[in-house]
Image (cartoon, grey):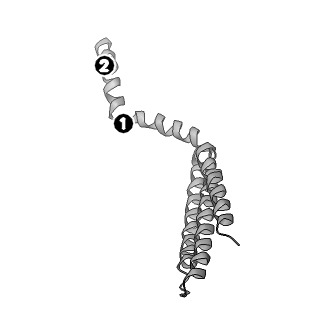
Amino acid sequence: MHLAYPAVLSALLFCTGLYGVLARRNAILVLMSVELMLNAVNLNLVAFDVWLSKTAEETLHSGQALTLFTITIAAAEIGIGLAIVLAVHRNRGTADIDKLRDTAESHDTDGPDRDASTAPQAKKAEATA
């Protein structure tokens, strides 16, 4: 098989995963898209490893070893990411990224800026009392 076939398939998978990361609103679908991108990289690593092993006499297969490391890291990433998404869903009631961003921005107003904006109102209340 020629090297162009797995390389084109890998590029299509990676572009599909990139579109999923940029366009999706659900955190679980974003994690699935990241997983698709990592699988495209794995396909590229194995394809280039086979292609390079045909041209060289050595059979080190470093591309396949890197693929195993990538699969291990991807499994850990999806496990931790899914645990975080489920914990956020239990606390906030949604896994929509835009709604989570909006609720995080509304909680930022509880900081020192809020105390400065309520200070004149507190002085008015003390003056009228």
Question: Residue under circle 1?
Answer: 111
Q: In whole angstroms, how far apart are the C-alphas of marks 2 and 1? A: 16 Å
Asked if residue 28 can be seen in this view, the reply is no
Q: Which quarter of the figure has residue 54?
A: bottom right
Residue at image position (58%, 72%) is 48
Callout 2 amino acid: Pro
Question: Residue under circle 2?
Answer: 120
Q: Secondary structure at mark 2?
A: helix
Residue 122, label in figure: none
The vertical placement of 102 against 95, above or below, is above
Percent across and percent down for residue 110 are 40, 35
Residue at image position (58%, 78%) is 64
Q: Which quarter of the figure has residue 65?
A: bottom right
Label 2 or label 1, whichever comes before in sequence order: 1
Q: Are marks 2 and 1 in contact (CB under 8 Å)?
A: no
Q: Rate crowding at label 2 as few (under 14), some (14 to 19) or many (20 or more) other CA atoms within 10 Å.
A: few
Looking at the rendered image, the quarter that the N terminus falls into is bottom right
Looking at the rendered image, the quarter that the C terminus falls into is top left
Callout 1 amino acid: Gly
Asked if residue 15 can be seen in this view, the reply is yes
Q: Secondary structure at mark 1?
A: loop
Percent across and percent down for residue 95 are 62, 46
Residue at image position (55%, 41%) is 100
Residue at image position (58%, 43%) is 97
